[in-house]
Image (tube, grey):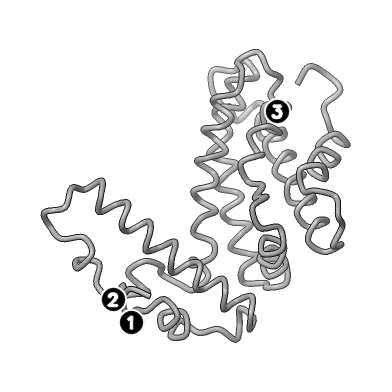
Amino acid sequence: MADLDTETAASPAGVPGGLRSRVRRAMRAEVAAAALELFIAQGFDNTTVDQIAARAGMSRSSFFRYFPTKEDAVLGDLAGYGQQILQALIERPPTEPPWTALRMALEVTIDTNDVTRTRQASRMFINTPALKARQYEKTMAWQALLLPEVARRLGLPEARADDPRPAALTASALACLDAAVTTWTTSDTATPLAELLDMAMDSVRPQTTL
């Protein structure tokens, strides 16, 4: 594996900012992949930053250039998912009911490329209190991010403190996603995650045009 010990070696000062950004994202992805492999193999609590750094071919200090904690090595992408969900929601047809638009936007969180690995990672999140708590924090950040667009789709100029509907719809949709992922992870069901999400969201679908 290539030595990732110095960012400047891979991204010299003369390299355009866009390329430096892509190089940094690629390095973060490689470190995150190494961390996930170790977490799955030996458990989150039994894995050290030094082990992750060694697996990624870098020093301990270099690890902290990319992630402030080992939790962030596997949770960092969750923040990015929030932006992806928002973009997908914005791109839904303007006349689509908000609840339907939210369901379709959440599709970006469903990884069908490696079901076994995704399930293993999900099980680790559920069974590790430190990760579960941080995951909840990031999910709450998703809710705040999505609120303005949900409010707009409800015909409101903005998410207002005196109108609970945008927050109720957004929080309910994200709760359905959490319920679907938990069921899919803990039951070893053969039902695809997308179908479980449909089941969860259909069970609480608003009885109006929302």
Q: Please tell me which of labels 2 and 1 falls first in the chain.
A: 2
Assess whether mark 2 and mark 3 are in contact (beta carbons under 8 angstroms). Answer: no
- Identified by mark 1, the residue type is Ser
Frontmost of labels 3 and 2 is 2
For label 1, the residue is 59
User: As displayed, is residue 5 above or below residue 161?
Assistant: below
Q: Secondary structure at mark 2?
A: loop
User: As displayed, is residue 57 above or below residue 80?
Assistant: below
- Considering every residue shown, the one lying at the far front of the view is 1
Please tell me how crowded label 2 is: few (under 14), some (14-19), or many (20+) other residues with Cα within 10 Å: some
Q: Secondary structure at mark 1?
A: loop
The residue located at (61%, 17%) in the rendering is: 93
Task: State the residue in front, 4 or 39.
Answer: 4
- Residue 118 drawn at (x, y percent): 67, 60
For label 2, the residue is 5
Assess whether mark 3 and mark 1 are in contact (beta carbons under 8 angstroms). Answer: no
Report which quarter residue 176 is drawn in: top right
- Residue 99 drawn at (x, y percent): 73, 27
| Screen quadrant of the C terminus | top right
- Identified by mark 2, the residue type is Asp
Assess whether mark 1 and mark 2 are in contact (beta carbons under 8 angstroms). Answer: yes
* Left/right of residue 131 with respect to residue 27 in the rendered view: right
Which mark is drawn over residue 165?
3
| Screen quadrant of the N terminus | bottom left
The residue located at (46%, 79%) in the rendering is: 52
- Identified by mark 3, the residue type is Arg
Q: Please tell me which of labels 1 and 3 falls first in the chain.
A: 1
User: As displayed, is residue 169 above or below residue 132?
Assistant: above
Please tell me how crowded label 3 is: few (under 14), some (14-19), or many (20+) other residues with Cα within 10 Å: some
Q: Please tell me which of labels 3 and 2 falls first in the chain.
A: 2
The residue located at (83%, 42%) in the rendering is: 200
Cα–Cα span, label 3 and label 2: 49 Å
